[in-house]
Image (cartoon, rainbow, N blue to C red):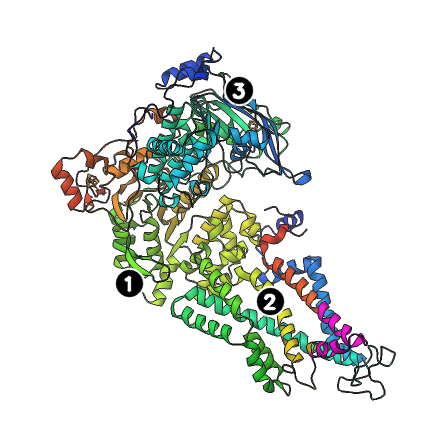
């Protein structure tokens, strides 16, 4: 409940002009005010930069094969060494990361958004909406996700990765959506939702303005976990030869391959594994700070 | 007083041998009471005279409680001392955060280990502060026992009530299980539980709140303790049940001769039961003394302020309340001098220098911690006057409500809300796997009232009377199950989407709990902008600034979140939001009951001021009849889904005609010890019947004191024929076949 001096000064300055930053600005401001948030964001930005701009620096492209160097250790020629096929580890790892970053982040965000919307609608409207949505949720829960993905894998070949992202997201949201639904049911009874209702705010607006923001902590944590889950699912799918199809690569397929040679050619494994770890760490940092940034009551926790 | 009042429910037969009937032997200790105390005692019959001369059974001195350490240390209690003698009732009053509950927990040794407690607590001569847990356990329940606010959490849900009491008996006594069980039944009988032998086999959840509190009292007196500490024992209860429980407490004191420490925020409860009062503020005792001294000759501006800020049930006319400005200090950041200094209307520079000690003022035993205590005129000056004369423009918020302007007669004004024969029944479901309907909860069953332009209708009743259900039905603006609701001339059953929106704009609501009714994720700006944006009115900025000013908040605070504000300020935000669209009707659902008294007064004044300035009409739903008397023009009393009585406030309060209204009014404690002593209580028996199965005929029949005095034919009429609201003089309606006028307050 205490207000920092800085804020007080700010308020005194603008005593008369009621000038209030939008919710987005507030959240962004609070996010970047925490060192953890800044570090996470910088790390994630670095990963993206590496994934998208990095390949331009290298001499090799991910499709190239150097037939003079199979499974070579890092050198001036091949910065991170080469694979058994003669492919440049630097080039393929960055290419793989590009896929994994995009697939992981997108699938996580889409999955969580789906969970939030479906759960909130089901919980808010109850009745038929709820029954229909719950039925769909339960159906997807009992479908063996891995099998469906495996069956659909031929569709993902030939650059159809956005479809892959969608299908991946489709199997990520059900449990969260059930949690969101039950939270919405109790949130709906809260007086501020009632107040909005009696003010004449339309239900859909209430859901997006009051219900979902009040679950932001849960959703951010869920999205963070989903990023890892999506990357790992993709990895395991790729391991079995589904998912991202060659010649495209992902961190998953690289790790799967690299694991076989990791013992005597560590460079084939550790670079992609390390990048995966750093990425997940960055996402977690961002997620944590984002959760605090969304929650105005978390202010006291970080100084 | 208790001795003269009627007994509550199922007046149990008293077996003298069950509990020691005679005053405790140790009462014959030291002699020589102070003259004034003896005089005081003699005016009050029925008091065990020996008690006064006794040694204190509980003596607390210089009690200090600190949570945390270093810069974050919070000194919750600072040097509190008090003592109680056998048979004496000490009332500890204070607002939330004043440290009153922490004090008692410290005495019981129930604070968490990270609390640092210093000072001394002597119980019947033994030091118990810092005593090993084993020693404490031997004292707890036997010599000192406690009654909590929430009896449900203090009772174990899976054990039968009788067994729990028997267990309490057996911890401290070697008796057979059978004897203990018998004693448990006797104790339940003593605290007025009807059919105690059968009820002893029930589980806690089968009891109502009032009955559970009786069980707690039974457990507390199971071993004839010397001291009973009651921490807000009646706060969660309805007034008629509160009156019963207070009566039981008085009886418990009589039977056991124990001293009672009564902790409460309700000055009325203290006035009725306490012999001496200790007022706490910011962790310190700021005034101590015999109850009459403290109430009639307060020497501390805070006590004066408290007394001046409570709405009075027994005062008609519109005496504006005198709020105490500001907010209580945070215990982590106390001002260096008198802790009340920032809010004190009489503060002088001297006050900020050092904390004034608690010193005796003229009457013996009357202590106050104020440098100007001597200047405060002894007696004769009503608190409000002192406070205002000295204020010098330091009161916060808008000035007290102005006199109401002359208005056209009630009949000439437009009806803004008309409710006719409103019915709302919920299905009562049972079973988890196969849910089936086992009955109907008749929450609202044929209720009619109307609100005219510019007036305030108070809808009052105890919990479960259906007032909130009625309110929600009105706010839904849907077709009711039965009857009609007409808001601003539009029948809700025939509203189109656009018309409904228009009505929503003109009818706004303020909820009870300001923290729950404001979205914690939104800034105050966004909260206030929401209604404006929803109803599409240009840039909300300037309007928000005006609104914040209107309710006495600083517009510069718009960027803050609700949780950055204090309770009273939050409720002001809630009010500002309701006023954003310039409504004509505002529905207020218990808007001040979550606030401390000193804060409450400011919000009530604000509501009154806004009403006359903006020409609003209020539907004010509340359980606090004193607040309603203060703010409402007309009142409708509900009982079990029906209107019992309706009419102009002064008329209903001064000469209530329905037996329920009478009982309700007489159950409310007045913050006035003399009147409280002189009053005759109409105690109601038992609990509210279940709305799923209301009694036939008159719903109040099972508890009606008048019904008992009727002859056979009269009783039959009450049981067979449901009374309708019939006119009882001008604009006054009563639903009782045998209503008559009577003064109670
Ligand atoms: S000491 Fe001063 S500030 Fe404190 S209550 Fe007395 S007059 Fe007010
Ligand atoms: S109608 Fe009969 S039972 Fe009902 S309130 Fe009147 S006297 Fe009592």
**Local crowd at mark 2 within 10 Å, few (<14), some, or many (≥20)?**
many
The one of B458 and B92 positioned closer to us in this rendering: B92
Q: What chain does mark 2 sit on?
A: A
The numbered mark at residue B493 is: 1
Using the rendered view, name the quadrant where residue B733 is placed.
Answer: top left
B148 to the left or right of B79: left
Circles 1 and 2 in contact, beta carbons < 8 Å: no
User: Which residue occupies 67% across, 76% down?
Assistant: A100
| Residue at the (31%, 41%) spot, across then down | B687
* Ligand 1 neighbours mark 2 (CB distance < 8 Å): no
Check if mark 1 and mark 2 are on a common chain.
no
The stretch of residues the image draws in magenta is A253-277
Q: Nearer the viewer, mark 1 or mark 3?
A: 1
Tell which subunit mark 1 falls on.
Answer: B
Q: Position of residue A141 (x, y in %)?
A: 50, 72
Tell me the quarter of the picture where residue B683 sits.
Answer: top left
Q: Residues within 10 Å of mark 3 (few under 14, many from 20)?
A: some
Give the spatial CA distance, label 1 vs label 3. Answer: 65 Å
The CA span between labels 1 and 2 is 45 Å
Residue ranking furthest to the top: B32
Q: Is residue B316 visible?
A: no
Secondary structure type for disc 3: loop
| Numbered tag placed on residue B282 in the rendering | none
Give the residue number, with chain letter if any, for mark 3: B374
**Residue bearing mark 2:** A223
Q: Which of these two is toward me, A16 or B217? A: B217
Q: Is residue A274 visible?
A: yes
């Amino acid at each position: 409940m205490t207000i920092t001096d800085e804020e007080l000064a700010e308020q005194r300055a603008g005593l008369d002009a009621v000038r209030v930053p939008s919710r987005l600005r507030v959240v962004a401001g609070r996010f970047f005010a925490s060192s953890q948030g800044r570090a996470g964001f910088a790390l994630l930005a670095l990963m993206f930069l590496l994934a998208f701009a990095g390949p331009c620096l290298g001499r090799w492209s991910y499709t190239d094969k150097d037939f003079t160097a199979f499974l070579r250790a890092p050198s001036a020629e091949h910065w991170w060494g080469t694979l058994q096929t003669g492919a440049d580890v630097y080039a393929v790892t960055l290419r793989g990361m590009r896929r994994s970053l995009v697939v992981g982040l997108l699938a996580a965000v889409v999955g969580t958004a789906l969970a939030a919307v479906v759960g909130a609608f089901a919980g808010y409207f109850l009745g038929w909406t709820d029954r229909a949505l719950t039925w769909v949720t339960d159906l997807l829960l009992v479908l063996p996700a891995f099998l469906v993905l495996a069956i659909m894998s031929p569709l993902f070949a030939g650059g159809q990765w956005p479809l892959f992202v969608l299908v991946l997201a489709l199997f990520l949201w059900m449990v969260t959506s059930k949690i969101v639904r039950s939270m919405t049911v109790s949130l709906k009874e809260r007086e501020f939702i009632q107040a909005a209702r009696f003010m004449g705010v339309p239900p859909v607006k209430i859901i997006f303005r009051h219900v979902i923001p009040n679950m932001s902590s849960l959703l951010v944590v869920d999205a963070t976990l989903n990023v890892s889950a999506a990357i790992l699912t993709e990895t395991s799918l790729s391991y079995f030869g589904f998912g991202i199809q060659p010649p495209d690569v992902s961190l998953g397929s690289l790790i799967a391959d690299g694991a076989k040679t990791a013992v005597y050619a560590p460079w084939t494994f550790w670079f992609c594994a390390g990048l995966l770890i750093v990425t997940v760490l960055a996402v977690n940092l961002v997620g944590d700070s984002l959760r605090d940034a969304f929650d105005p009551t978390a202010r006291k926790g970080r100084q | 007083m208790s001795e003269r009042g009627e007994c509550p429910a199922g007046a149990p037969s008293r077996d003298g041998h069950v509990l020691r009937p005679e005053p405790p032997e140790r009462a014959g200790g030291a002699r020589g009471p102070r003259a004034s105390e003896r005089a005081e005692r003699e005016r009050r019959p029925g008091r065990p005279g020996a008690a006064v001369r006794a040694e204190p059974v509980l003596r607390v001195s210089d009690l200090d409680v600190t949570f945390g350490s270093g810069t974050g240390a919070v000194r919750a209690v600072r040097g509190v001392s008090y003592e109680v003698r056998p048979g004496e009732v000490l009332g500890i009053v204070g607002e939330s955060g004043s440290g009153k509950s922490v004090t008692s927990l410290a005495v019981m040794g129930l604070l968490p280990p990270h609390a640092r407690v210093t000072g001394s607590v002597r119980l019947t001569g033994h030091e118990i502060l810092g005593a090993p847990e084993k020693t404490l356990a031997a004292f707890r329940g036997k010599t000192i026992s406690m009654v909590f606010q929430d009896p449900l959490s203090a009772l174990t849900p899976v054990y039968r009530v009788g067994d729990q009491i028997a267990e309490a008996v057996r911890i401290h006594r070697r008796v057979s299980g059978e004897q203990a069980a018998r004693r448990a039944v006797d104790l339940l009988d003593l605290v007025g539980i009807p059919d105690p032998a059968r009820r002893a086999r029930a589980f806690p959840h089968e009891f109502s709140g009032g009955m559970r509190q009786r069980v707690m009292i039974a457990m507390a007196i199971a071993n004839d303790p010397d001291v009973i500490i009651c921490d807000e024992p009646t706060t969660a209860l309805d007034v008629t049940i509160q009156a019963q429980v207070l009566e039981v407490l008085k009886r418990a004191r009589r039977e056991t001769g124990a001293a009672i420490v009564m902790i409460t925020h309700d000055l009325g409860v203290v006035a009725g039961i306490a012999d001496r009062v200790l007022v706490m503020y910011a962790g310190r005792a700021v005034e101590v003394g015999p109850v009459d001294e403290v109430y009639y000759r307060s020497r501390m501006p805070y006590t004066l302020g408290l007394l001046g800020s409570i709405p009075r049930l027994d005062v008609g006319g519109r005496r504006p309340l005198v709020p105490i400005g500001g907010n209580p200090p945070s215990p982590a950041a106390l001002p260096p001098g008198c802790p009340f200094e920032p809010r004190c209307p009489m503060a002088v520079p001297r006050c900020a220098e050092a904390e004034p000690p608690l010193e005796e003022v003229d009457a013996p035993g009357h202590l106050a911690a104020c440098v100007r205590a001597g200047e405060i005129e002894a007696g004769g000056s009503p608190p409000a006057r002192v406070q205002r004369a000295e204020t010098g423009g330091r009161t916060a918020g808008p000035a007290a409500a102005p006199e109401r302007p002359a208005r056209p007669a009630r009949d000439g004004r437009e009806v803004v809300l008309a409710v006719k024969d409103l019915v709302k029944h919920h299905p009562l479901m049972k079973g988890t796997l196969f849910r089936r309907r086992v009955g109907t909860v008749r929450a609202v069953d044929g209720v009619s009232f109307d609100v005219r332009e510019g007036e305030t209708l108070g809808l009052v009743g105890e919990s479960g009377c259906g007032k909130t259900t009625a309110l929600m039905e009105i706010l839904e603006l849907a077709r009711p199950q039965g009857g009609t609701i007409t808001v601003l001339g539009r029948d809700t059953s025939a509203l189109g989407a656009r018309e409904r929106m228009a009505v929503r704009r003109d009818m706004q609501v303020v909820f009870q709990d300001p923290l729950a009714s404001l979205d914690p994720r939104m800034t105050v700006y966004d909260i206030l902008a929401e209604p404006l944006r929803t109803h599409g009115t240009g840039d909300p900025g300037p309007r928000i600034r005006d609104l914040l000013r209107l309710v006495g908040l600083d517009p510069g605070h718009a960027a803050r979140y609700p949780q950055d504000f204090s309770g009273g300020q939050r409720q002001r935000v809630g009010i500002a939001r309701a006023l954003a669209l310039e409504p004509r009707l505002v529905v207020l659902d218990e808007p001040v009951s979550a606030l401390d008294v000193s804060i409450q007064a400011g919000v009530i004044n604000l509501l009154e001021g806004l009403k006359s300035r903006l020409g609003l009409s209020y539907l004010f739903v509340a359980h606090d009849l004193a607040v309603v008397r203060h703010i409402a023009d007309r009142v409708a009393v509900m009982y079990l889904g029906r209107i019992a009585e309706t009419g102009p406030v002064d008329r209903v309060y001064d000469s209530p005609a329905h037996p329920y209204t009478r009982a309700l009014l007489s159950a409310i404690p007045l913050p006035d010890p003399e009147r409280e002593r002189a009053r005759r209580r109409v105690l109601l028996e038992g609990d509210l019947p279940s709305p799923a199965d209301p009694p036939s005929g008159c719903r109040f029949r099972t508890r009606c004191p008048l019904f008992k005095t009727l002859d056979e034919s009269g009783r039959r009429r009450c049981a067979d024929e449901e009374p309708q609201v019939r006119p009882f003089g001008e604009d006054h309606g009563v639903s009782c076949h045998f209503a008559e006028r009577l003064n109670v307050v």
